[in-house]
Amino acid sequence: MTARQQLGAFGERLAVHRLEAAGLRIVARNVRVPAGEIDILAEDGDDLVFVEVRTRRSIPGVAAESLTPTKLRRMWQCAMDYCERESADPERVRIDVVSIDLGRGGRVEVVEHFRGVEIPD
């Protein structure tokens, strides 16, 4: 496993803990669909939540800033692909982002959970 993959796996584990602490139920991780991969799939009441995890190490700014409009549109397409495949209600879908910023030595400095991220046109 590369250093980048290890960082991503660490971020996803931390995100799962944060989401569970917030009351979400984790359904699956690293779900493949035609449009790409969903980092974490969770349920929040009746809502199906597709979660993108962004982890950064010692870079100025917030990890969530690395999300481009293109990536957000791809996340939405992943959600729609999943709903079609699993016959889930696309009206009950939400896109969330968990942003994790690490300081020197890999110490967790900031973890933020952004709920219901707007998808650009």
Image (cartoon, helix red, strand yellow):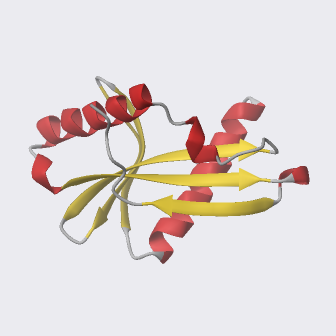
Q: Is residue 92 left or right of residue 67?
A: left
Q: Residue at x 58, y 36 (%)?
A: 66
Residue 89 visible? The answer is no
Q: Residue at x 78, y 41 (%)?
A: 59
Q: Residue at x 50, y 62 (%)?
A: 113
- Can you say which quadrant of the picture contains the C terminus? top left
Residue 31 in view (yes/no):
yes
When the figure is inspected, residue 9 is found, relative to residue 49, above or below; the finding is above
Which quadrant is home to the N terminus? top right
Vertical arrangement, residue 23 with respect to residue 83, above or below: below
The residue drawn where x is 71% and y is 40% is 6
Residue 92, picture quadrant: bottom left
- Location of residue 44 by image quarter: bottom left
Q: Position of residue 62 (x, y in %)?
A: 65, 48
Where 74 sits versus 108, above or below?
above
Q: Residue furthest right?
A: 105
Locate residue 65: give its quadrant. Answer: top right
Residue 98's spot in the image, x, y percent?
52, 54
Specify whether 95 is left or right of 62. Answer: left
The percent coordinates of residue 37 (x first, y second) are: 40, 33
Q: How many marks?
A: 0
Closer-to-camera residue (118/16)? 118
On the picture, is 120 further left or further right than 39?
left
